[in-house]
Image (cartoon, helix red, strand yellow):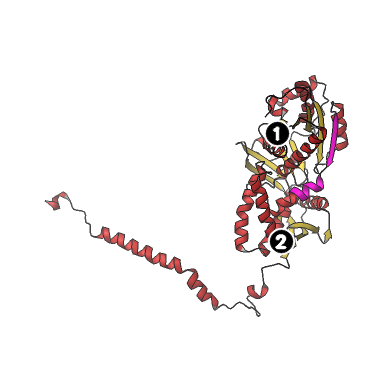
Amino acid sequence: MTRFITLGLTVALAYSGGLDTSVCIKWLQEKYKADVITVTLDLGQKDNLREIGKRAYLLGARNHYEVDARHEFVTGYVYPAIKANGLYEGKYPLSTALGRPLIAEKLVEVAQKEGADAVAHGCTGKGNDQVRIDVTVRSLDSSLKVIAPVREWNMTRDEEMTYAQNQGIPIKPSKSIYSVDQNLWGRSIESGPLEHPDQEPLPDAFEWATLPEEAPDTPGYLDLEFLEGVPTKVNGQELNPVELIQFVNQLGGSHGVGIIDHMEDRLVGIKSREVYECPAALTIIEAHKDLEKLVLTRNELEFKSSVEREWAWLVYSGLWMEPLRAALDSFIETTQKRVTGKVRLKLYKGNVRVVGRSSKNALYKLELSTYNKGSTFDQRNAVGFIELWGLQARVAAKVAAKVAGMSEGRTAGYQRETPEEIQ
């Protein structure tokens, strides 16, 4: 809420260097006479952070913080998402959704360090990100006011451009007709022709993934090794968390893997056509899910699938700080103790397919599954198993037949008589 905000505030602003947040600096200075502290996080979006800092000072920021949060983002947010097989509505790997609570956390840290009265961000009133940041900030420090200038001023894009020109804000010519947000875990592409869900995305929308029809004719193979649910090695080589995701993004994208195009239910009630590029996310989650099938029981997998849906919903809807999310993490962590092993994936023309898996914790036992010599499974035991397994079904079928027969018997004694026959 931004009501009853006094003048002369110190405000910590989440600053991307783009038009929206650049306008926010001037707007906060003009409307609230605010001292603005800008905060930019490196989550792997490949922006020129040095230039962003210079731009912030040029626009009048009192101070600027640049935070390399890539490792923390992976270990504290992406890893839990992998363990939870985090896919909102079965499609979206939550890339932007995972980054927002970390941005909010760092924003609060800077605000407290600088003695700020409020924090601000450039989210719109139509999206989910406003909820993710607002809720996380207020959960971490309820004394901080939250200001969302874009939401509050309700300007159109043209009005925003006019305001920027009137304020002397240098506007870089846009390189794209799309609105893009990206971090290590994925790239979100919106606006322009993508607002028409009946139209196929144009090739210029994509940067990470080769179009499947243009991908190599020779398939690529990837060996992923997991330790307690976390990917640690690719093709036998141990990489740090950031490098591993970057490697899989590059390899998967080169084979056309990672393009997502679906209709998404936003938290604010809007049906939205969303297009993403998430090569590493889709590849790693596919491998992780398959490894879980090798080492977890049917009951564990069945129950965990319902936990995963709830986990994805909480993260998507901005409730990273919700105690239930932490409770679900505790259950998920328990299941991951045995999720150690290797998964081999085949990447070809936009598809990723598991073609092999192994684990010291595998519940698959060759001597039980084989139809060849050496089987330890005594097939004669199946007779008694089937007898008991279908017992209730057989009893219920007999009861149902009896009930049906009784119904037929009740109607069988009745005959239709004409008025003439009665007379």
Q: Which residues are magenta?
A: 60-77
Q: Quadrant of residue 125?
A: top right
The percent position of residue 21, horizontal first and vertical second, equals 77, 30
> Is the residue marked by circle 2 packed among few (<14), some (14-19), or many (20+) residues within 10 Å?
few
Q: Is residue 311 visible?
A: yes
Question: 154 or 218, which is in the foreground?
Answer: 154
Q: Quadrant of residue 51?
A: top right
The amino acid on which the numbered mark 1 sits, given as a three-letter code, is: Gly
Q: Which circle's residue, 2 or 1, is located before the other in the chain?
A: 1
User: On the rendered structure, is 86 left or right of 245?
Assistant: left
Q: Is residue 163 above or below residue 97?
A: above
Q: Is residue 349 visible?
A: no
The percent position of residue 218, horizontal first and vertical second, equals 77, 57
Magenta stretch: includes residue 28: no
Residue most extreme to the bottom: 373
Q: Is residue 42 above or below residue 17?
A: below
What whole-number distance in Å separates the C-alpha atoms at marks 2 and 1? 45 Å
Magenta stretch: includes residue 75: yes
Question: 5 or 301, which is in the foreground?
Answer: 5
Disc 2 versus disc 1: nearer the observer: 2
Q: Secondary structure at mark 1?
A: helix
Q: Which residue is mark 1?
A: 192
Q: Which residue is mark 2?
A: 337
Question: 149 or 257, which is in the foreground?
Answer: 149
